[in-house]
Image (spheres, grey):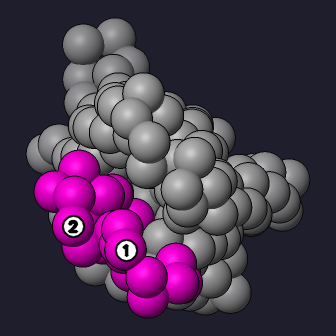
Amino acid sequence: MTRNCGVESPSPRPRIHQTHPHDTPHFHSTLSEHKLRRFNTLIFFFRFASFCSAFSAAVLMLATKPVSPRWTDFGAFRFVVAANAIVALYSLFEMVVSGWEIYRGSTIFPEFCQVWFDFGHDQVFAYMLLSADAAGTEMARQLRRVATCTDNNAFCIQSDIAVGLGFAAFLFLMISSVLSGFRVACFVIKGSRFHL
């Protein structure tokens, strides 16, 4: 409705009834879709790097020779293997989700659930991996003080490399968490997972 000298007349175009700011359809230009695809590709890259590091850490720890000592003899190393295996599986799932989002341009879950799911799980698994690697580092330091590492140096080298790869997986997962936190912030502020 437009006002002409205090008299309301119908608008020449019908207006969209908007009850909530999130009800308006989002306009996606080709440039903004290109930026979104590039951002999702960046997330996919860090998920892939996290998967490779965590998977390599778990496999390297599992591949120690079956002589004494073994990784199963130490609780901290069992925690390192379990945490890296969980993060590898989670990263593989998130790679599929990111690939879906790059290919289809939409999320698997509803957008609200997807952004909070990604951010929450990134935080939980990053802290779990950090605590496992911290425990593994301390166990590796203790083994260096005793005769274990002089008797079986290959075990100590493999466990050191596995813990180092676990820290690399944490670093990549932390960067993924920052990017998914950006998506949450954009969703809270703009109602979309990416600021367009």
In the image, what residue type sits under mark 1?
A: Ser
Q: Tell me, yes or no, whether the highlighted magenta stretch contains residue 77.
A: yes
x, y percent for residue 92: 49, 81
- Left or right position of 71 against 97: left
Q: CA distance from mark 1 to mark 2?
A: 9 Å
Contact between labelled residues 2 and 1, with CB atoms less than 8 Å apart: yes
Q: Which residue is mark 2?
A: 73
Residue drawn at the location 42% of the way across and 27% of the way down:
145
The residue mark sitting in front, 1 or 2, is: 1
Classed neighbour count for the residue bearing mark 2: other residues with Cα under 10 Å, few (<14), some (14–19), many (≥20)? few
The image quadrant that residue 63 belongs to is bottom right
The image quadrant that residue 118 belongs to is bottom left
Please, what secondary structure does the residue beneath circle 2 have? helix
Q: In the rendered structure, which segment of residues is drawn in magenta?
A: 63-92
- Left or right position of 56 against 125: right
x, y percent for residue 174: 48, 38
Sequence-wise, which precedes: disc 1 or disc 2?
A: 1
Q: Is residue 23 above or below residue 51?
A: above
x, y percent for residue 107: 42, 76
The answer to whether residue 6 of the structure is visible from this angle is yes
Determine which of the numbered discs, if any, sits on residue 169 in the image: none
Determine which of the numbered discs, if any, sits on residue 68 in the image: 1
Foreground residue among 90 and 66: 66
In the image, what residue type sits under mark 2?
A: Asp
x, y percent for residue 53: 62, 62
